[in-house]
Image: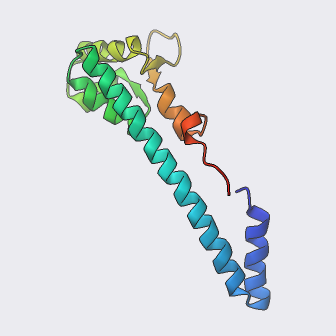
Amino acid sequence: EKRKKEYVDRLLAVSTRGEWSGWIEFFLDAVIEQSGRTVVLAESIVRLRERQMAMVSKNRASSRLFRLIDHLLEWPVVSARSVTRVLEVADPTARKDIGALVDMGILEQASDVSYGQVWYAPEVLAIIEGRDDDTTVPSG
């Protein structure tokens, strides 16, 4: 996205002048850059998972929370209903598990509504959105 103009210019050069070498070089540079970003993102997610798993262990919480943390790495926004499906538990148990993760700071409630409550994993979203300091990729 940040090199969109160059992308269009290089494609135009291929179609008008057959300049494939410039396009291939540009494309490979982009693949290398994105690969580096993906590695940093994956490493940040692994570190977050390890921290959160350790927190659950330290608090001697239900082993179901390990599965819920893994789910949050894929789907960082949940409802009590979605947690009942993921963990295969009743609504009160799902709400208890959500509450445990809220108490640990792993989940936050999205709004103060009493019906249709939604919780989100702020650290997961920060990594995905690139707002986490660990996901900054040095340029160059």
Q: Is residue 100 above or below residue 34?
A: above
How many marks on residues? 0
Residue 59 quadrant: top left
Evaluate whether residue 85 shows in this view: no
Q: Is residue 63 above or below residue 15?
A: above
Residue 134 quadrant: top right
Q: What sort of colour scheme is used for the picture?
A: rainbow
Q: Residue at x 67, y 53 (%)?
A: 139
Q: Residue at x 25, y 12 (%)?
A: 92
Q: Is residue 88 left or right of residue 139?
A: left
Q: Residue at x 56, y 41 (%)?
A: 135
Evaluate whether residue 58 shows in this view: yes
The image quadrant where one finds the N terminus is bottom right
Image coords of residue 70 (percent x, y): 32, 35
Q: Nearer the viewer, residue 56 or 70?
A: 56
Q: Nearer the viewer, residue 27 or 11?
A: 27
The image quadrant where one finds the C terminus is bottom right
Q: Nearer the viewer, residue 38 or 115?
A: 38
Image coords of residue 60 (percent x, y): 22, 15
